[in-house]
Image (tube, rainbow, N blue to C red):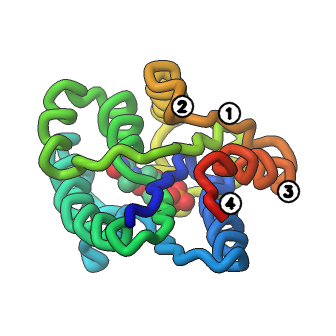
Amino acid sequence: MMGHFLTFEGPEGAGKTTQARLLADWLISQGQEVFLTREPGGGLPWLRGALLQTPHPLSPESEYLLFSADRAEHTLKIQEALRRGAWVISDRYLDSSLAYQGFGRGLDLAWMLQVAEKAAPLKPRLTFLLDLPPEEGLRRAREKNRFEGLDLSFHARVREGYLELARKEPHRFIVLDATKPLEFIQEEIRRAIMPLCGF
Ligand code: TYD
């Protein structure tokens, strides 16, 4: 039996975490097994704090390789859950690196994808992109971590990057307007997964 792999993407403050949890709760209430997880830290929990708080900026290459090391371990856990038939819901996956380190910090996307062939071989069945203007995202997030402290133009590139990824894979990405009410967005998410629900 194979489960379904779903991811949530978007900027800080877009409500990814809340939406992922609401979806997980609903699936559980329907008798489904759910593995709710997140990055960074899904694979190597001890790396999360270091990646989010390191005081000295890393080169984009090292940053991506560290996120990738975490992701490679995370992928093994995800595969195991999928084999059990669980729904895997991950708050961020490879698209976060493509958006932040790739579009945001200018890392070469072709090289990133080559690394990802080994470190992140899974393709989510659906990716919910919670799209939000960067000004609004930053206002909501109030500088929680060092990525959030980066300037507005960085966050604008991240947003454009996400939208570009979504345009390239319209069957995988579902772009949602994160300024809409929480319940409305959750409805859209549930409607999108209906075709996958065999219950
Ligand atoms: P986190 O505290 O998990 O907040 P949220 O996901 O709610 O925004 O912060 C994760 C931060 O790490 C976020 O600023 C994006 C960044 N990040 C990357 O730059 N690259 C990555 O590959 C991942 C997974 C996250």
Verify CB contact (< 8 Å) between mark 3 and mark 1. no
Give me the C-alpha separation between circle 3 and circle 1: 20 Å
Task: Determine which residue is flagged by label 3.
Answer: 183
Q: Which mark is residue 159?
A: 2
Name the quadrant containing residue 53.
bottom left
**What secondary structure is marked by label 2?**
helix
The residue type indicated by label 4 comes to Gln
Instruction: Give the mark nearest the N terminus, 4 or 2.
Output: 4
Task: Determine which residue is flagged by label 4.
Answer: 19
Name the residue at 38% across, 52% down.
93
Give me the C-alpha separation between circle 4 and circle 2: 19 Å
Verify CB contact (< 8 Å) between mark 1 and mark 2. yes
The residue type indicated by label 3 comes to Glu
Task: Determine which residue is flagged by label 1.
Answer: 133
Instruction: Give the mark nearest the N terminus, 4 or 3.
Output: 4
Give me the C-alpha separation between circle 3 and circle 2: 23 Å
